[in-house]
Image (cartoon, rainbow, N blue to C red):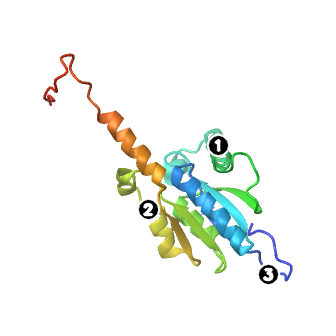
Amino acid sequence: MHGSERHDGGPAPRVVVGVSGSLGSLAALHRGVAEARRRGAELWAVLAWEPPGGEHGYRRSPCPPLLAAVREDAERRLHEALDAAFGGTDPGVPLQPVVVRGESGPALVHLADRPGDLLVLGQSGGLLRRRLRRSVAAYCARRADCPVLTVPVPELLHDLEALHRRTRWHLPLPAEGELAPVER
């Protein structure tokens, strides 16, 4: 499962990128391609998935058809993310899409297990989401046996979040053209 070999018999270098479909992970894919080109490495685009309710919940109430549907959805999301990142074109480096069952952090650390690997991660979600969920990047930085590169959130994401906040909280002006106090 750990890829191809170089001409000298050693394992081919890899750039492992965590993919979720978020703008942050798409930015990480682009950075991963640049790093793979620079290193002459394979690009492994990895999407980790878990059964609904997590592994513990699935062990308590197994449902193989649901598990198969969730895995198929994960495969579809990975291919959609690759299409969104590369527009259906070849990224110019050997690409290995990988869908793996497990929590994102541990799954990525397990796959990027060689010292010559590079693990590339993007930041995803807004501030609230990052505070509510355990940081995959922080987990990987602490536990990985290879270098971890965290790609900052693209400026476009900041602009989109600001636009979303404005439209979400925008209150229409009263008909008279005066601002009315907001009732709570």
**Distance in Å between CA atoms under marks 2 and 1:** 29 Å
- Could you say which disc has been placed on residue 64 in the image? 1
Residue 135, image x, y percentages: 43, 62
> In the image, 93: left or right of 29?
right
Question: Dot 1: few (<14), some (14–19), or many (≥20) neighbours within 10 Å?
Answer: few
Element assignment for label 1: helix
- State the quadrant of the C terminus: top left
C-alpha gap between disc 2 and disc 3: 33 Å
Circle nearer the viewer, 3 or 1 = 3
Amino acid type, label 1: Pro
What x and y, as percent, mark residue 53?
A: 49, 47
Q: What type is the residue that disc 2 sits on?
A: Ser
Point 66% across, 77% down: residue? 114
Q: Quick one: which residue is furthest to the top in this view? A: 175
Q: Secondary structure at mark 3?
A: loop
> Dot 2 lies on which element?
loop
Viewer-nearest residue: 170 or 131? 170
